[in-house]
Image (cartoon, coloured by chain):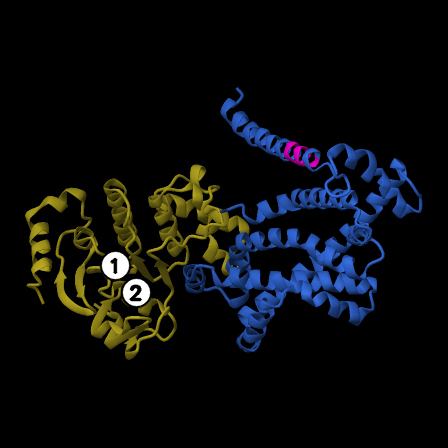
Amino acid sequence: METLIKFECVTKQYIASGRGAYKALVNLNLSIGKGELLTIVGPSGAGKTTVLNLIGGIENPSSGKIVLPSLDTQLATGYVFQANTIFPWRTVQRNLTYPLELRGVDRNLRQEKAVQLCEMIGLSPETFLSKYPKELSGGESRRVAIGMALAREASLLLLDEPTSQLDYLTKWSIQNTIQRLWLQKRFTVVLVTHDLEEAIFLGDRVIGLQAGVIACEVRIDLPRPRIDHMRTTKEFGAYREQIVTGNNR
Amino acid sequence: MRDVSSKRTFCKPLFLRIGFILFVLVVWEGLALWVSKPKLMPDLAFLCVHSLPSLAVFGGVSGEDWNVAIRVLFSNVLVTLLRIVIGFILGSILGVLTGLCIYYVQSVKHGTSALLAAARSVPLFALIPLFLYWFSGQELGIYLYITFAVATVIATSTYVAVVNIAPQYVHQSRLMGASKIQMFRTVIFPAMQPELAGGLRNTLGLCWAFSLGAEYMAAKSGIGYLLYQSYLYADMGKLIVFAFVYGCCGWMTYFAVRPCLRWMRRWV
């Protein structure tokens, strides 16, 4: 698989008041393939979000470098943040078409695209397009955030705990939406979660981060499309066991 | 079908408000009767029958004349209102631009941080004598003072409103490919509006105090000027009438701009 992003000995250090300097990532070496669905799992403070922020260019590494071997230009990146970042002052329609508006796409075309995007993310256009984010549930907001990233026509999608704080049914529904979109578009996805089941269900490869270093790396060979009842299979359980015990690389 | 519950919730605060005003009036009347010195604490009847019509004295009529008194009151309220409207609009525009400038231009931010910190500790009313000397009590001085005072408060509100915008919105916008101007138009400007609305509302209230301060010292018209004249003659009744007029004017200006403030907070 062609490498899209490569972390070469990347360290990220923060200076926090009262805590002194601490390293969120320590000499991280990681390759992300083009079209791969990589999931990163780990406890809070393991450095998962830092990995996404570095890929998205929101932060810079303290040492080491991140290279894009196959690209000369900047990646079109869609980022679904952990905190809800759909713009509360815009309706769902205007949120979904925000990237198109920035590119100066005609209003009518934007309207058509909003309907398509709304259907893609599993929301009814008639009901949702005119709503404001404050009128949406947590799951609906996450879907709109994913829709915004799709509107950007991103070749790289960064998802930071896209199903956290959601009930099980909504969680599974969003996981299935992510998988369906990925199978349709084949963009590269880096998904960060602390839900092991979600990491295995969605990922081609699962990276376990612990205190800024890779503790385990497991390739998931479950067939696609993965369906919900696979979560209860023996193979699924074996992957879980493998990641928890760190018996892998 | 009528929504009875919403009607109830609408009526309840209205009754409470009226009830509270009546309560204050009853307490006032009780105290006035207990003190029984109309020159120190006039009762409501004295205020209505003597103090209010005696405002005619500012219209050149000695004694009490309702028509002249009302004309004097309205003309002076309009003068003060004009000063406030112009000062508020100019000061708000200037304040928002200054606040944004402080946020966006690093050199301005560093240059003005010490100045702002010092300016915050100087009461704005302490600057009235300066404006009085600079503009020799001219009308321009009053306008400039209100504009300056409003701009100072709004600049701080704007800066704080922009600083408080969640960084994720800015990151999201940048990742979506927004230029700096697009980011300002689509993220910074709408996102700062709710907090700025709070600043504008408070400043609108302060505007009456700013105008009072300026008129108290430098004007030949306006409610502040009339209030000062009444103070010189220790006319307690007129002072209370003017305090009531200030209250009504402040309330009415708030209701006049409320739709605009609500629009600024529409998505909150």
The answer to whether A193 is drawn above or below residue B27 in the figure is below
Disc nearer the start of the sequence (2/1): 2
Q: Foreground: A166 or B63?
A: B63
Seen at 78% across and 67% down, the residue is B132
The tint chain B carries is blue
* Chain that bears disc 1: A
Verify CB contact (< 8 Å) between mark 2 and mark 1.
yes
Most common secondary structure along the magenta stretch: helix
Q: Secondary structure at mark 2?
A: helix
Name the mark on residue A9. none
Query: Residue B144 sits in which quadrant?
Result: bottom right
Q: Residues within 10 Å of mark 2 (few under 14, many from 20)?
A: many
Query: Residue B139 sits in which quadrant?
Result: bottom right
Mark 1: amino acid = Val
Name the mark on residue A192. 1
Q: Position of residue A49 (x, y in %)?
A: 29, 63
Q: Foreground: B67 or B98?
A: B67
Q: Position of residue B192 (x, y in %)?
A: 53, 57
Residue A91 seen in the current view = yes
Q: Position of residue B63 (x, y in %)?
A: 91, 40
Seen at 71% across and 62% down, the residue is B147
Q: Which chain is yellow?
A: A
Q: Foreground: A108 or B4?
A: B4
Seen at 52% across and 62% down, the residue is B160
Q: Secondary structure at mark 1?
A: strand
Residue B71 seen in the current view = no
Q: Position of residue B66 (x, y in %)?
A: 87, 36
Q: Foreground: B61 or A170?
A: B61
Q: Residues within 10 Å of mark 1 (few under 14, many from 20)?
A: many
Task: Specify the segment rendered in magenta.
Answer: B26-32
- Residue identified by numbered label 2: A52
* Chain that bears disc 2: A
